Image: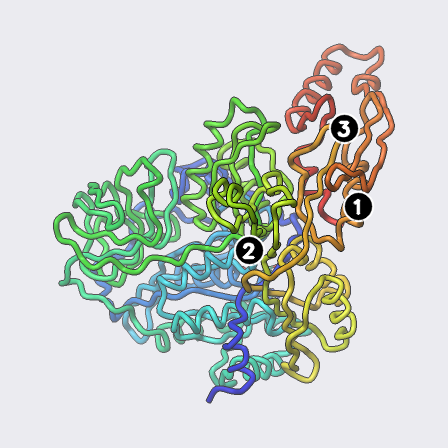
Amino acid sequence: MVSQFWQRLLQHRWQRQLRLLTKPYFVRYQLDCQRGPELSYSGFRSISGSCKFQQQHQQLPFDISEFPVENIRNFCIIAHIDHGKSTLADRFLEITGTIAKGNNQQVLDRLQVERERGITVKAQTASLVHTYKGRRYLLNLIDTPGHVDFHYEVSRSLKACNGAILLVDANQGVQAQTVANFYMAFEAELILIPVLNKIDLKNAQPEQVAEQMHNVFDIEKSEILKISAKQGTGIDELLSAVIERIPSPPGDRSKPLKAFVFDSWYDRYKGVVAHLAICDGVIKKGERITCASSGKTYELTEVGIMYPTQVPCDTLYAGQVGYAMMNMRNVDEAQVGDTFFHEKVPVQPLPGFRSATPMVFAGMFPSEQTDFLTLRNAIEKLTLNDRSVQVKMDNSPALGQGYRLGFLGLLHMDVFNQRLEQEFDVSTIMTAPNVAYKMKIKGEKNIKFHGSDEVTVLNPCLMPDPAIITEYYEPMVNGTIISPAEYLNQLTALCHEHRGRIKDQVYIDNTRVMMQAKFPLSEILVDFFDELKSITSGYASFDYEDAGYEITEVLKLTFCLNGREVDELTMICHVSRARETASRICLKLKETIPRQQFVISVQGKVNQKVIAREDIKAFRKDVTAKCYGGDVSRKMKLLKQQAEGKKRLRRIGNIDIPNDAFLQILKK
Ligand SMILES: Nc1nc2c(ncn2[C@@H]2O[C@H](COP(=O)(O)OP(=O)(O)OP(=O)(O)O)[C@@H](O)[C@H]2O)c(=O)[nH]1
């Protein structure tokens, strides 16, 4: 039976979550590694060590052909951020003997950025073998990210699964991302196994949270399993439920090969590696396969499964999930969502993935123009692993040749930038992020010049002259907030402050309320989540989804340093916010730009009219001053460090600005 509340939720299709920009970056990890064989997942330098807990299987300890489709289960773990997905994946790997017991790392969080930030940003697959009632089963598990900015990874992962474990923290209860993930899985028609995690916690309230799950998702309380992923309680029962409740994938070994590419990445030594779900047939090393999208044919140089790192196995059978390499060097040829078939045995390709809708756009330029080709190369390879990034060429008189990239959120943008630096050694300058405005223009000549009477402005510097604009439109989102009810008044005020319109609010149990409101995307992009956490003592969660465009009034705000316009800082903002934003950013620039040997005037302008101003006083910085009379080698070292630091500065006229200043100044 579908409750009324549930139907209402379905109507709005509130999916997607928000933001935890500030999850502590302190998750330290000690790789305690001896450099061993390359961890074969990818060519990323950042994970090329082999950790002591990571059992490196050179070959599979079982025969992959022994698993017919009836003995295969493909499932993923979905949950709100931090509810314990990666910890649960670790326990699965341990209990099935895939990795040695006693690691306290999150094995499937393979990227350096994930380990440093303690969050999953990339869905990862691992295969495990479990014996249940005397039969051996091959379980293919996908650990997914929890943060809203990486929801595209979740939606893609669901396509390769027949079921999902919906994990809820027994202490925190149902959160906005739980709701979003539930509907994503529901739309994908997956069988859900509801699970309460962290029951070992002193403050866990499994009964109350089970009640919430019943109220919000209409889930029978008797179906909910209770576990502690950390302590390993209830994991065996959960594995049994996976086998009992999740159906085996459809598939027939005797049919022609049909393999679905659900992920891919670039290995610097082996070229493109594709993650495949074998829908029908059998795929073998040495065979020739054709990609449905390009029609190109390749010879398979290696196939295998993730156990939990790449282990070759020569053959993959219908229903199984694994990887394939085929000497594909051109990253453009590796399409996620593609179908592979045997050469000259074409099959009907599977529908691919819906492309992601970018929410924020920013310019990305190499720190040194001579590095443009390196940046291009790095972006091509990284976007192979992250298909949610939209890439367009861009050109700026000040910054030279670069790209305008579209991201799913600010954390996504930050992580992408960090991955470029860590995995490809590229140093970049990012412009201030902005949303995509639409503008209606008038005049035949102008319409002809822009190619349409509606212009989408991704780069604020390229906004048409206001004199020819008749209407402005801004992107909107439908937001969902779940919070303790005692903060309702503060929540209402916060929504209004951010130009939000509250559409609905319902109680999900005696103490928690779910509020739904429509916001301009630009209003929730930067500080909204921090403010929300702060007014609710950290108890609220937020999720949002695209809600089209609405008419608005905006203007172009520019910033000048000693009279020179700084392209990176040009932004479009709502008329009502112009003065406040200009003053705030001028002040932030004053705090962020290091004092230099001359006075710097910082001005915020609209239509060349100054609306805010700050001055940065002169300051003479002599890094070697503290070495006065000291050892010359120490002096040289400091000067070298200073020179290194300067590489991270953007020079405007004769003023140096730290590269990360453009993002920092946007935060309140
Ligand atoms: N007490 C307790 N802590 C747990 C349990 N499961 C996970 N944790 C802790 O919860 C925190 C988050 O766990 P993760 O496994 O990283 O959560 P996640 O859902 O994978 O996080 P994201 O991938 O970033 O969304 C970690 O500090 C874990 O140690 C549990 O059963 N009990």
Identify the residue under disc 2.
149
Looking at the image, is 227 positioned above or below residue 125? below
Identify the residue under disc 1.
584
The quarter of the image that holds ligand 1 is bottom right
- Near mark 1 (Cα within 10 A), the count class, few <14, some 14-19 or many ≥20, is some
Q: Secondary structure at mark 2?
A: helix
Measured as percent of width and height from the top left, residue 230 is found at 56, 64
Q: Secondary structure at mark 3?
A: loop
Quick one: which residue is furthest to the front in this view?
A: 444
Measured as percent of width and height from the top left, residue 450 is found at 50, 42
Please tell me which residue lies in front, 81 or 571: 571
Label number found at residue 563: 3
Quarter of the figure with residue 528: bottom right
Please tell me which residue lies in front, 264 or 232: 264
Quarter of the figure with residue 369: top right
Q: Would you say 579 lies left or right of 423 here?
A: right
User: Is residue 662 visible to the viewer in this orientation of the structure?
Assistant: yes
**Three-letter residue code for mark 1:** Arg
Is the residue marked 3 within 8 Å of ligand 1, measured from its CB?
Answer: no
Measured as percent of width and height from the top left, residue 220 is found at 49, 85
Q: Secondary structure at mark 1?
A: helix
Residue occupying image coordinates x 33% and y 69%: 131
**Three-letter residue code for mark 3:** Gly
Query: Who comes first in sequence, dot 1 or dot 3?
Result: 3
Q: What is the distance, in whole Å, between disc 3 and disc 2 at their CAs? A: 37 Å
User: Is residue 82 visible to the viewer in this orientation of the structure?
Assistant: no
